[in-house]
Each structure stands twice: as structure tokens, then as C-alpha cells.
Image: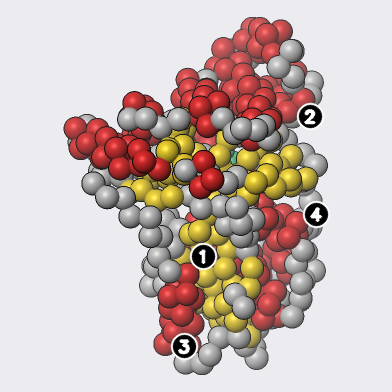
Amino acid sequence: MAVSLDTGSVASTVDGARRGFHERFGSEPAGVWAAPGRVNVIGEHTDYNDGFVLPMAIDRACYAAAAPRQDRTLRVYAAQLDETVEISLDALVGPGSAGDSRDAADPAMAPLAEPAVRGWAGYPVGVAWILQQAGFPVGGADVYLTSTVPVGSGLSSSAALECATALALAGVSGFELTTAELARHTQRAENIYAGVPCGPLDQMSSAFGQDGSVLYIDTRSGEVRPQPFDLAAENALLLIIDTRVSHAHGENGYADRRSACERAAEFLGVAALRDVSVAELPESFAKVSVGLGETFARRLRHVVTEDARVEQFVEILNQEPLSLPRLGHRMMQSHASLRDDYEVSAPELDLAVATAVAAGAHGARMTGGGFGGSAIALVDRDLLDDVRAAVVAAFAEHGYTEPQFFPAVASAGAHRIP
Ligand code: GAF
């Protein structure tokens, strides 16, 4: 069975965005801005614990074709949904309602009680809202959004949409956003306006992505260290296996894991679980088991060991010759910890991982928040067809929907299309 490595042409998508804008709004866009989705290679559920992550931006992106308007209206059309949201920017002053004193520097992530819009529209509108809150002069705009990031696949279609929208609004309104501002404000839009308590991983990946590199990010300091990740030189690739089980099923599970970590940190008297070292883990595990219960202790163990695995993975990446089996081993440990201690995997993800490895992958793991979405497998190119065929057969045998496959190609972060 041949594996198609074609992920669609960027040029045709950009052209499609331009043409789509023209058909919808009757004029030419002032520009097109693109922001990628991501896969997290390792370091899962560590970002909201101030820990380490190792994502890369992928060559699937959201494209925003946009033009300024003379009035204060923001009109956004989402091509994949065939839906438009239209709102006055003046209705977006103040956090949802006048008199709420929260501003963009406020660390509180509590969602707005009454955002002006909900659902998908809350993402682009939330971006306009947060940028205004932060004092940027957002002007009226028409925005046409089209995306090649599959929705619900755990590849950050929402961060891609947010970052593309933010850059387009900045571009047509005539202000600049630094990469760090882009990541921070879009995350806050998602937390506060869309009401999703995500950490900084997805928006940082989309903003800071680099061609050919994974990003070693310390989410506490915000430091981003790109690490070359040239799997082609090893005749290997990172294969994304989209289980087609929407990760949206896990929204409550995500919030629950996040608050369990916050409780465990508070109980241990540390600012975040990042502050518990591997050496302290046995003692901290015992304390949390007795004080809060064994489930909390297992959540703690996942976060502490996962942070350590990110550092080990980066160490291996920097050694010559590169050992794919050692990288694969860390991926397997990460998956087991997410499945057993953190309990965010799904039967389809477990099957994809086990089958890929049985068919010869060096390692595999779920990626993203879990409860569905995608797995990634580190595969030698000459075994690609075998791995894919084995996973397709295993899914069919279990009566699961056929998964989709595409390569994770480390790509540039959010940018204006020249
Ligand atoms: C989701 C969240 F949005 C991220 O912030 C991160 O916590 C991830 O799950 C798990 O690592 O993608």
C-alpha cells in the first residue's frame, strides 16, 4: 500500500484564500497570512505546569486573507464551515461587559462569563478582543479563513486560526506584534474568551515554528531554543496517525488534569509541578498519595518524569550519531505515562502506538491533549508502507474508523505570505 506524502500545495491554498476572499467580499485582499498547526514531539501536559515541551510547527496551516474596512466592523468567514461572524469592534471594548477591570496583563485566566460570541467564532473574535484589551489599535476588517489543519485531530487547528487571525488584524490595522506577543495574546484569547484552559504550547509552536527544527521551550521563562531535527538525513520520518476520534471529547478531562496539577503543587508548597525534581519524586509521590490520594500522585509522577524525558530527548538529539531507537524509547515511555499515570490516552491511540511499533517504528506516542486526536510514530522510510498497512488493518479489525496518515514536516511559524 503506497503512502502519499503529498500534504497539498501551499501555493494553491494561498490562491484559494485570495480567490475565496474575492468571491465572498467582492474585492482584493490586502494580504494573506498563514499560521501552522503543530505536533508535540515530547513533553505532554507539562506546559501548564511551567515545564518543558518539544513541539514543531507542521506544514498544515490556517490561511487568513484580509483587507481593512472603513468602519469598525469585523467580518470573518470560515471557509470549511461556510459560516460568517460579523461584529462591531466597539462591542468588544471591555472584557465582555463594561466595568470588568481585567486587562491583558492580568494573570487570571478565568473565562468571560458572557463573551459576545461563542463556538468557532469565539476564536477570531476573542483574538480581536484581546488585542484591543492589550491596547493595540485594531481596525475594522474583512477576513477569509481557510485551513489545512484537520479539526479535532489534536494538531492545534485553533491555535493556527488564532495566530493567522492576529497577524492578519495586525497587518491590515498597521501595527506590529512580536512573536512572543503573538503567542501570549492568542493563548489568552483562547483561555479567557473561548474559555479553554490551555497552556502556552500550541500558540508558541504556531508562532515560533522554524523550518527543519523542533522547538525546545521552557514554558516558565518563555525561552525557545530551536533544535535541528533532520530525520530525512536518517532516512526516517515522523508519521502523524490521525485516529479521527475528536479530542473535543476530552474537554472536561483536560480541565480536570490541569486543576489536579494545581492542587498537587499547592499541597507540596511549590509554584508549579515543574519545581519537583526527579530526586524528590518518591517522597513527594508518597506525600501526595496520603494527602490527596493516589490519582493525584500519579498525575504528579507523569509531569515530573515527562519533564525529565524532554531533557533526555534533547540530549539524545544533540549526540552523534543520532540514535533513533533511543528517541523512540523515550516516546514509548511518554506514551505509557500518559496512558497509565495521566489517563489521557484512548483505545485508538493505544492501538495506533502498539501497532506502529510492532510493525517496526522506533517509537510512537499520542501527541497533544489526548482523549483522541493523533499519534506520531518515528519510522524508517523503508518501513513506512508496512507501518501504515499494519495500522489500517488493526483499526479495521477493531471496527474503528480508518485513520489518516501524513508526515510531520518541521515548518516555519506564523508569517505573512510574500
Ligand atoms: C493541548 C493544550 F492546548 C496544550 O496547552 C497542552 O497542554 C497539550 O494539550 C498537552 O500537552 O494541546
Residue at position x 63%, y 73% from top? 416
Is the C-beta separation of discs 3 and 4 under 8 Å? no
For marks 4 and 2, give the CA distance: 19 Å
Going by the numbered disc 2, the residue's amino acid type is Ala
Is the C-beta separation of discs 1 and 2 under 8 Å? no
Going by the numbered disc 3, the residue's amino acid type is His
Mark on residue 22? 3
From this viewpoint, is residue 92 visible? yes
- Residue occupied by mark 2: 271
Q: Earlier in the sequence, mark 1 or mark 2?
A: 1
Ligand 1's quadrant: top right
- Residue 132, position in %: x, y? 73, 69
- Residue occupied by mark 1: 62
- Residue 214, position in %: x, y? 62, 46
Going by the numbered disc 4, the residue's amino acid type is Ala
- Residue 273, position in %: x, y? 71, 26
Q: Earlier in the sequence, mark 4 or mark 1?
A: 1
- Residue occupied by mark 4: 105
Quadrant position of residue 372: top left
Q: Earlier in the sequence, mark 1 or mark 3?
A: 3
Question: Dot 1, crowdedness within 10 Å: few (<14), some or many (≥20)?
Answer: many
